[in-house]
Amino acid sequence: MADLALLLPILVPLATACLCAMAWTRPAVQRQVALAGAAALFGSSLWLFAEVRGAGVLATQLGNWQAPFGITFVADLFSAIMVVVSGTLGLAVLLFAREDVSKAEEHAGFHPLAQGLLAGVNGAFLTGDIFNLYVWFEVMLVTSFGLLTLGRTREQLDAGVKYVSLNLVGTMLFLLGIGILYGATGTLNMADLAVRLPDLAGQPAVTGAALLFLVAFGVKAAMFPLFAWLPASYHTAGISVAAIFAGLLTKVGVYALVRVFTLMFQAGDTNLQAILGVVAVLTMVTGVLGAAIQWDVRRILSFHIISQIGYMLLGLAIYTPLAVAGAVFYVVHHIIVKANLFLLAGVIKRRGGSFDLRRSGGLMRQAPWLAVLFLVPAMSLAGIPPLSGFWAKFLVIDASLDAGHGLMAAAALAVGALTLYSMTKIWTEAFWKAPPAPAVPAPRGAARVGAATVAPIAALAAVTVAIGLNAEPLVAFSNAAAAQLLSPTAYVETVLGGTP
């Protein structure tokens, strides 16, 4: 049963994608199947989480091929919580999509592509093989390109080319690093690599592979200076697609960085710490400055994805138990908050008629409920207490000060202040100021906001508030996950079947 719990988060979306593809000409059937599949994925993710919490690290070998020769799937605390957040977000976005995605986009394959993307994301979280991580990255790349270009507009196709071109560079570097690593070690199983690589530390091939992985995963995570593909593409996608992208895609890159540079390579190496520290600060600063000069809500939120990635990288750069726990907490918090902000951007457009803040206004009077729902994730993103973002920033900044990195802590605080400026800018322009004259007419029927739109936004906001008001369980969980990451003995022994 434990093996089934480990595989279901991948099998469920794959099966759902196949069923949706079989109902290609029947969008109504696809909607029902996709929502049922998302609910099943959410349930299976909770089952896996409960199994990992109760039994510890889980591993299975497909075809009964003993590790390191077979295809391995592994779940520890970090990967289990990532699967839960993925399932939560998938259910919320697909419920929102029922009123957001057009029939033309459904005919273009939204539902099977979205399910395929969720399968790729969960596959990346659960794989125990570095080559299969590359395979799941490719599944994500193919499905995300299809989702990005669903509308087949010139703007989307242009963004799709930039998105794929830059991500393919990262993919090629990743594959090159895999080849070098296999030539040096003769294995691709990550637990086996964790055993072999310490004996090869300092060899040029191993160092080169580590640097290639850093760049490749840095492209996927949109870290400085490899983030150009993100602000060039996310704002062109439909809101449901953008919400999935904002919540999950860059976090898979962050997950890969944390997994590889705790299990296989040691981010505690002084030189690597210095590189990650500089990159983390530059990622935070460039992202928040890019957001500050934008007027399109989607562009502001896209640049803030980059900025917030810097906080997660900062936790890995400091590489203390508290810092890594802060990174885990930050990833969980940010997936929920950022996806919710993109969903809210869609409602702002629907009620106000434009994504451009200069052409918006008056929403405070028109929809006070929307103003309240926006304030929760917006203030959480800025780190205002008592919301989840406050605790996420507190953990990372506290870890920076404990480790003697005062400049990093100061940069994180300054970026938080500028994030608050951006969120206040959206609030002032879209909600507080008077509507522009003449008012921008919204498309016919666009102002209607049904239960399928409000429910997922309210649910994600409730999660943000719940974490903020009762942060101790997630802090304790993040500390336990960080302990597993920094001391992966249980991971290695479970995969390899005993003490290596």
Image (spheres, grey):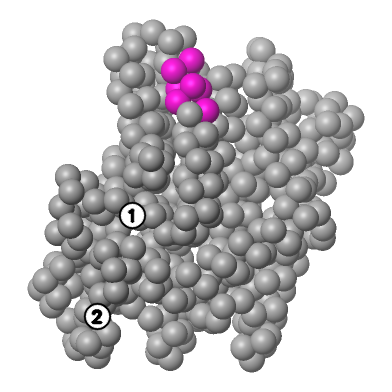
Q: Is residue 146 visible to the viewer in this orientation of the structure?
A: no
- Real-space Cα separation, disc 1 to disc 2, in angstroms: 21 Å
Q: Is residue 78 visible to the viewer in this orientation of the structure?
A: yes
Residue 232 is situated, as x and y percent measured from the top left of the image, at 45, 49
In this view, the residue in front, 229 or 494, is 494
Q: What residue would you read off at disc 1?
A: 59
Overall secondary structure of the magenta stretch? helix
Instruction: Identify residue type, mark 1.
Output: Ala
- Which residue lies at the image location 46% right of the left edge and 70% below the top edge? 485
Q: Is residue 138 left or right of residue 313?
A: left
| Image height of 195 relative to 114, above or below | below
| Image height of 358 relative to 390, above or below | above
Residue 101 is situated, as x and y percent measured from the top left of the image, at 51, 22
Cβ atoms under marks 1 and 2 closer than 8 Å: no
Residue range highlighted in magenta: 32-39
- Which residue lies at the image location 42% right of the left edge and 80% below the top edge? 267
* Helix, strand or loop under label 1: strand
| Image height of 331 relative to 232, above or below | below
How many numbered marks appear? 2
Q: Quadrant of the C terminus?
A: bottom left
Q: Which mark is residue 197?
A: 2
Check residue 33 for magenta coloring: yes
Q: Is residue 119 left or right of residue 68?
A: right
- Which residue lies at the image location 74% right of the left edge and 41% below the top edge? 462
Instruction: Identify residue type, mark 2.
Output: Leu
Q: Is residue 296 left or right of residue 139?
A: right
Q: Quadrant of the N terminus?
A: top left
* Helix, strand or loop under label 2: helix
Q: Is residue 450 left or right of residue 83?
A: right
| Image height of 326 relative to 46, above or below | below
1 or 2: mark nearer the eye: 1
